[in-house]
Amino acid sequence: MKAYYSDRHCDSFVEEEHLRDGCARLQLIFRTWIHFHPAGQYKEDDELWAVDDWTAEGRSRFKTRFAEVIREGFGDGAIWILHNQSGVRDVWCDVKIVHEEERSKAHMCVNALNNPTAIGSAGGYRSNCVRGGESLLGSVFSMNNPIDMSVTNGVVVGGLVSRTKPVSDAPAPVTFLQNVLLHEFGHYLGLRHFCDWAGEPNASEQYCANRTTYEQDDLMAVGNSIRSHHVNPFLSRLGKHEYVPRASCFGFVANDRQKRPWIGDPNWSWAQ
Ligand SMILES: [Zn+2]
């Protein structure tokens, strides 16, 4: 049985034939269009950066790694939906990026910046996700389909970013690793910063500054840990399928069961 659902942000289906450990699969497919920003100047929030051109090989590597990072981070067994109902299978969550050549066919539009270098007072460029199309009108998805995410070649192809931060539960600062693309894609899924209640948008407090190691290590803070709350976008998506009565979704429990190494694991290697 397959039940498709499509909207501005993804296509999805629940597949009960394609089982993994006896669980059904909820697959989210993100049709993705990447704008490779040409060499020159890039302006964002009144700040300027100089960006390099892209080679054909560079574009290809960016697209491949973009899809791999997101699949390994959010899909492929990193997130499961478990419940106690007999007769209804548990669900393993999968994510797939499908690259589109035409912007009008895409759910998610990405601005790819190669090696942005500050001009004037601009600091280091920060990749970001604004999920821009949500309330505007225009494309095949009845939306304007502007850029949802701006990311650098460095965070997509380069991998983990290291940040050393003071914590409240240890005498010395702790070094956190994060895959920034996964963090930004988390925003695209609708996830907010782990401590977003604690400060203004993008203030350090929202990233759990000076709080515990556990809090800062969340993917939606400055770390790379996938946690139970990251299942929420999948739970809400499941509610759009008739896989189970919607009311019973409240009884679902997610855990961090992982079936294989993924990019968030210290032992991860691309060779696997
Ligand atoms: Zn963020």
Image: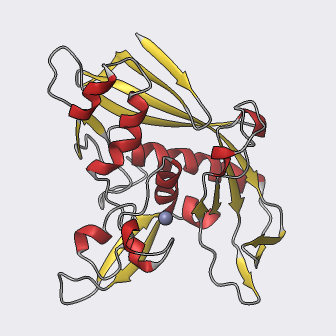
Give left or right: position of 102 versus 11: right
Q: Is residue 164 visible?
A: yes
Position of 172 relative to 272 (above/below): below
271 displayed left or right of 166: right
Name the one closer to the observer, 86 or 91.
86
Q: How is the image coloured?
A: secondary structure
Residue 134: give x, y in percent of width and height.
63, 45
Q: Is residue 176 left or right of residue 259?
A: right
Q: Residue at x 39, y 28 (%)?
A: 239
Closest to the observer, 61 or 121? 121
Find residue 16 and report its horizontal and vertical position in percent: 34, 15
Give the residue drawn at x 22%, y 83%.
168
Tell me where residue 47 sits by quadrant. Answer: bottom right
Q: Foreground residue, 102 or 251?
A: 251
Q: Front-most of 201 and 224?
A: 201
Q: Is residue 191 above or below residue 76?
A: below
Residue 43 vs 261, above or below: the answer is: below
Q: To which quarter of the image does residue 209 belong?
A: bottom left
Query: Would you say residue 102 is visible in this rendering?
Result: no
Residue at (65, 60) in percent of width and height: 150
* Count of marks placed on residues: 0
* View extreme (top): residue: 1
Quarter-of-image position of residue 89? top left
95 up-or-down from 179: above or below: above
Q: Position of residue 200 (x, y in %)?
A: 48, 74
The quadrant of the rendering that contains the N terminus is top left
